[in-house]
Image (spheres, grey):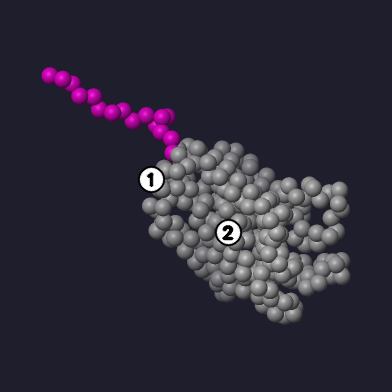
Amino acid sequence: MASTSKPVYDSASYRVSAISELKELGKYRYLLGQLIRRDILTRYKRSVLGVAWTMLNPLGTMLILTFVFSNFFKSEVPHYPVYILSGLLVWNFFSQGSNAAISGLVWGGSLLKRIYIPSSVFGVSAIGTALVNLVLSLVPLVIVMLVDGAPFYSSMLFLPVSILLLTAFTLGFGLFISSLAVFFPDVAEMYQVLLTAWMYLTPIIYPESLISAKWMPFYKINPMYWMVKMFRLPIFEGRIPSWQEFLPAFAWAVGMLLVGWIYFTSKTEEYAYRV
């Protein structure tokens, strides 16, 4: 009588490819939507103003920074409140989204041990929540433009492209940094210091015209320099970015998304045992 051998499952030989992870994420799109909904509702559940804090937070920061720095930069930058708020919206999206991606993967680690869900769902939902907050934050930007008398340009129709590039870059970077934080816990703490330095090395508070020509090449290797520029040009300068401005931003966005996604998915099977 011939013996039949059962297949043996070897976890060491199991690898989740970048493509298969993307397919699995598509299957769990309902869960993705529920996680975004949960993050938005629970974040402001007990506050009196609720989701309005999403709009008041960048507005309050803008007012403080405008009060502090307007005497220094107002002569250099007309409609300085619009200038600073347009940069803050981009930075808040990036910093909040990438930080949420780190905490989301750590929070979801215990869940990954009990049931199967694609681990990328936590990072993607974090960026999705930040995207909803960014769209809501456009409301105070419009209000500030009206109050400050800033013109509205037809080039602002380019903003969805700017937001798409920013989202792609933030998602890729968020996945990459959250994966590193799982294996090296100190990364999460070091990242807060990096964010502070990174913000001041990006022309958000101060105008680009103050940057010395000899330092400009260093600024241009900063990906957030290009992300802020893509968002600010249609609003503040009233023009669509040129190809020389668009291509570096596009390269950073697509490149970071690919690197972050491939690196993250290459470690997928280990996350449940690391957090």
The main secondary structure of the magenta stretch is loop
Query: Please, what is the three-letter code of the amino acid marked with disc 2?
Result: Leu
Query: Please, what is the three-letter code of the amino acid marked with disc 1?
Result: Tyr
Residue 212's mark? Answer: none
Residue where numbered disc 1 is placed: 116
Left or right of residue 182: residue 90: right
Q: Check disc 1: other Cα within 10 Å, few if <14, some if 14-19, many if 20+.
A: few
Residue where numbered disc 2 is placed: 164
Left or right of residue 137: residue 67: right
Q: Position of residue 251 (x, y in %)?
A: 64, 49
Count of picture labels = 2
Q: Secondary structure at mark 2?
A: helix
Q: Secondary structure at mark 1?
A: loop
Query: Can residue 128 be seen by looking at this rendering?
Result: yes
Rounded to the nearest angstrom, the CA distance separating label 1 from label 2 is: 30 Å
Q: Residue at x 52, y 51 (%)?
A: 123
Q: Answer with mark 1 or mark 2, whichever residue precedes in sequence.
A: 1
Task: Give the residue furthest to the top.
Answer: 1
Q: Residue at x 54, y 65 (%)?
A: 132
Query: Can residue 47 be seen by looking at this rendering?
Result: no
Q: Which residues are magenta?
A: 1-16
Q: Position of residue 268 (x, y in %)?
A: 47, 40
Q: Is residue 258 magenta?
A: no
